[in-house]
Amino acid sequence: MISQDFKQRVKVSAIFLLQVYKVTTGTLLSLFIPQACVDEEGLNKICTLQENFDNADGYHKTVLYFNMFSMFTFFTYYLVELRREEWAIKYLDIDNDKPDNSLKEIIRADPPLDRKMDKLNLLYYRTLLFNCGTYAINLGLSAKLVKDGYHSSSTLSCFASFSLLVLMKLYNSLEVARNSVKDDKMTSAYMSEFVSFNVLDADYIEQQLEKKIKDEIQLEEVPITILPERDETHIDTDSDNETFKEVNSKEVNSKEVKLEESI
């Protein structure tokens, strides 16, 4: 039977391989961003990867070398991150029945393990901060290169998309590292779980309550007309009798008229 540790290692390795491509294109911007070149006929075209690499311009070479340095710092940071994940998979586990902040209380029973976790979290956080600073400089240098070698809208779109992919990775890693150091726990940078919604939203409940109160207020403001009840003990008066006699006399007269006409 396949162990849980083996599954976790396979998952981390697969995610890392996908991120290698993302980091390579996001750091070596001077190679992968479409730039303007002139062909043998004097027409503008998009430079090939080889032409970007062989570009002898001084600033282009400087940016290319710094791109490579930035990629090197990324993979150094990845080594620390993978070492941290491997240590967590080997010595720790995930129990959904326990809160996320329960590890510190448990690991205090093993001081060497506790010190190792703190050391790995601190090393991971500091390496990540250095890498973020290096990549910020890399973006600044590459932005000027994009401006000088602009070819078309694809130049800007590739620069934006490659950079955003790397920035998203850095942001997620910073959240993991900061929370791990601040809350003294071991948060994975690769394994995440789906969230299940199990209660009603507080804003929705408040809206429904306000709506119910408003409806009750409107109901209270509606005027209600109450018809008087019929008096069962009503006694006929003289005026009622006179009215009844007038109706009867009219009916008798109408019958006599009809009889005469028929004769």
Image (spheres, grey):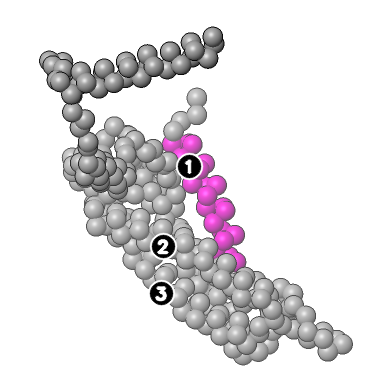
Counting every numbered tag in the picture gives 3
Residue receiving disc 1: 9
What secondary structure is found at the residue carrying circle 3? helix
At label 2, the amino acid type is Tyr
Mark 3 — residue? 133
State how far apart marks 2 and 3 are (Cα).
13 Å
Label 3 CA crowd tier, 10 Å (few <14, some 14–19, many 20+): few
Q: Is residue 175 left or right of residue 111?
A: right
Asked whether residue 149 appears in the rendered view, the answer is: yes
Report which quarter residue 5 is drawn in.
Answer: top left
Look at discs 3 and 1 and give the one toward the viewer: 3
Q: Where is residue 209 drawn, in percent x and y?
A: 25, 42
Secondary structure of the residue carrying tag 1 is helix
Does the stretch in magenta take in 19?
yes
The residue at 46%/16% (across/down) is 257
Mark 2–mark 1 distance (CA, rounded to whole Å)? 23 Å
Instruction: Say whether disc 2 or disc 1 marks the residue closer to the N-terminus.
Output: 1
Q: Looking at the picture, which amino acid does disc 3 mark?
A: Gly
223 vs 40, left or right, is left
User: Considering only vertical position in the picture, is 174 above or below 87?
Assistant: below
Q: Are marks 2 and 3 in contact (CB under 8 Å)?
A: no
What residue is shown at x 71% (from left), y 73% (from top)? 49
Q: Position of residue 237 (x, y in %)?
A: 14, 20
Instruction: Characterize the magenta stretch by its predominant secondary structure.
Output: helix
State which quadrant residue 201 falls in: top left
Boundaries of the magenta span = 5-25
In this view, 149 is above or below 186: below
Give the number of the disc on residue 171.
2
Q: Earlier in the sequence, mark 2 or mark 3?
A: 3
| Point 47% across, 69% down: residue | 73
For disc 1, the neighbor class at 10 Å (few under 14, some 14 to 19, many from 20) is some
What is the CA distance from the residue labelled 3 to the residue labelled 1?
Answer: 29 Å
